[in-house]
Image (spheres, helix red, strand yellow):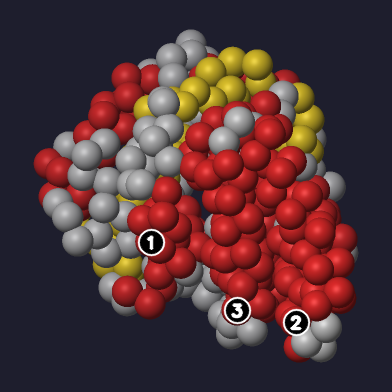
Amino acid sequence: MINKPFISVSIKTLNEAECIEKTIDSIRQQITDYPHKIIVADSLSTDNTQQLASDKGVTVVSLTEPGDRCCGVGHQLGYLYSEGEYLLLMDGDMELEKGFIDRAIAFLAEHPEYAGVAGTVEMDDAANYEFKSRKQRLHKIYPLGDCDHLGGGGLYRRSAIEKIGYLTNRNLHAYEEAELGMRLLDAGYKLHRLDTPYFSHTSHTMPTFKLLKYRWRSGYHQAPGELLRSAWKKPYLGYALKMVKNEVIFTLYMLILLISILTFDAEIIGMTLLPLLAFIILKTIKNRSLMGGLQSVINLAVLSVGLIKGLSRPMRDPTTPPDSKVVHE
């Protein structure tokens, strides 16, 4: 009988009471034949996520400081309490698809040069601009074959993570998988996305502008600047710039627009506004909606301000563990 590898599953959560039970159940159904540990890494949820997860009998760990909340800290917290040969990363609004674990384990066993593997993603019908846009770009966000990072998580080889020092960067409010990918590729590893279902995702149901406001308050829109700050003086800075090139270009454009407005010259202001009008028109045509075109501009404008804010944000050593506690074991 072949001994199967031990898998630790990190589920990062913040107020996921609506979905966390389904997430845990879907994982258990798929890893029952493997020795495993399921860890809910919670960022101080204010709903009953922790209690629901505890009632499911899984390990529940939590941050103790609200100021540590961000996307990057979740899986790093889970990693600190994990064990075994492989790490599976999931969010509390995902459901693991049948067959992925077996195929992912087989791929990594056959290809020791690969640090991680993921699969295809299914999304429900989105109710707001951000998730509608994301659903339209699934093939770009989650490309098949060899890739530079595994958006949405994946199954990772622990030995590769130990080699690069930490799993996800506790400073990042987004792009944590991209930053992880940069470090793995820089260490000589490869990443791959299989043409097999990995997870289905439940979209946020907040209206567009309410979600935008929530993202701003949570620090999410600082992430482009934080990513650049984390990559500063690193070999992968160029890749980080490529990841957030749209935000960088729009930030530079907004600065030029601001300078033109300060000239109080109507002709100069008019000429500077032309690219913005052209962008709105192109986005309106693509989205078949004027509101969609305007939302694209607003979203980019918020990200641009967030980029500047993120660049100026103090960064903690990503290898320093966040303060945490065990809620249930």
Q: Position of residue 36 (x, y in %)?
A: 38, 34
How far is the residue under mark 3 from the one under mark 1?
16 Å
Return the residue nearer the eye: 79 or 72.
72
Q: How many marks?
A: 3
Q: In this orientation, does residue 249 appear? A: yes
- Residue furthest to the front: 266
Q: Going from the N terminus, do you reach mark 3 or mark 1 first?
A: 1
Q: Are marks 3 and 1 in contact (CB under 8 Å)?
A: no
Amino acid type shown at disc 1: Tyr
Question: What residue is shown with label 3?
Answer: 309
Question: What residue is shown with label 1?
Answer: 214
Callout 3 environment at 10 Å: few (<14), some (14 to 19), or many (20+)? some
Horizontal relation, residue 240 to residue 322: left or right: right
Element carrying mark 1: helix
Q: In this orientation, does residue 105 appear? A: no
Q: Are marks 2 and 1 in contact (CB under 8 Å)?
A: no
- Name the residue: 27% across, 46% down: 16
Return the residue nearer the eye: 53 or 37.
53
Q: Position of residue 131 (x, y in %)?
A: 49, 39
Q: Position of residue 218 (x, y in %)?
A: 41, 66
Disc on res. 261: 2
How far is the residue under mark 2 from the one under mark 1?
30 Å
Element carrying mark 3: helix
Return the residue nearer the eye: 135 or 70.
135
Element carrying mark 2: helix
How far is the residue under mark 3 from the one under mark 2?
22 Å
The image quarter containing residue 126 is: top left
Horizontal relation, residue 315 to residue 187: left or right: left
Horizontal relation, residue 322 to residue 253: left or right: left
Amino acid type shown at disc 3: Lys
